[in-house]
Amino acid sequence: MDERTYSLDDVSVVMGAYNEAEAIGPVLDDIEATTDGRAEVVVVDSSDDGTADIARERGARVVDQPPSGYGAAVRRALYEATNPVRITTDCDGTYPMERIPEFLALINDGYDVVSGDRLYHGAETMPAMNRLGNRVFAATASLLGGRTLHDVTTGMRAYHADVIESIRWTENTGLSAELLIRPAMRGYSVRQEPIEYDERLGETKLDPFSGGAEIGKSILKCCLEERVRSLR
Ligand SMILES: Nc1nc2c(ncn2[C@@H]2O[C@H](COP(=O)(O)OP(=O)(O)OP(=O)(O)O)[C@@H](O)[C@H]2O)c(=O)[nH]1
Ligand SMILES: [Mg+2]
């Protein structure tokens, strides 16, 4: 990757939003405060509860998309973003937006991916079943991926845009796992950074059973594909 030092003007913060009227205001206000309003904000929206209006009022770029799942929204948001540092978040109030400048500093230190690790601090606010599921996902991805991965489904990461643009992304609910596993297995430098994780505002959009099964399948598929790729 290039040696350029990036500022907050070079950051795009991106998210999918599906009926997050309760949460999106505070999330966008936190981003505004922590970046001095300098970051581009892209929201891919599938809501019918006024979420898009709240986002536009706060200066975000809103892209409309029919409800098509987490990954379809986040992938589109990552591609719509125009800046060289791309930071993902959920727009549900769970992720610490005040850590954005630190994530940017780690990209400037030379990391290609900075992944917010919710499990390091115990993730006590995460529902117990999700916590258990995430530990199983991390152990599976570490075993099959050949390096220790701590929190493969976190929604908060920073990426150098080259990583986003040089890999073909295929997963939907499992996109977050794919966004960590493929770069890690291709030798990009990945930093796993402990973060706090808060309770969600509003309703969850993920069914823990069908969603969990889909994520498990994505982990197996991505690890296997990357192994085969490394042998070619
Ligand atoms: N545009 C769009 N956004 C979506 C869709 N599904 C989920 N999202 C958004 O993707 C993010 C992740 O969804 P969450 O419901 O927070 O899933 P989760 O983080 O696994 O579950 P929680 O523990 O409840 O937070 C949120 O910002 C959702 O609004 C969709 O079909 N379209
Ligand atoms: Mg969430």
Image (tube, rainbow, N blue to C red):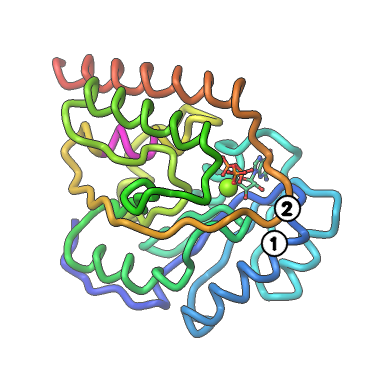
Q: Is residue 29 left or right of residue 170?
A: right
- Residue 184, percent from left and from top: 23, 37
* Type of amino acid under label 2: Gly
Q: Residues within 10 Å of mark 2 (few under 14, many from 20)?
A: some
Q: Residue at x 37, y 37 (%)?
A: 152
Residue 232, quarter of the rendered image:
top left
Q: Identity of the amino acid at label 1?
A: Ala
Gap between marks 2 and 1, in whole Å? 7 Å
Q: Residues within 10 Å of mark 1 (few under 14, many from 20)?
A: many
x 43%, y 64%: residue: 83
Horizontally, is 79 left or right of 181 in the view?
Answer: right
Residue at 18% in and 48% down:
189
Which quadrant of the view contains residue 8?
Answer: bottom left
Picture disc at residue 190: none
Q: What number is the disc on residue 23?
A: 1
Residue 52 in picture, x, y percent from top left? 77, 60
The kind of secondary structure element at disc 1 is loop
- Labelled disc at residue 202: 2
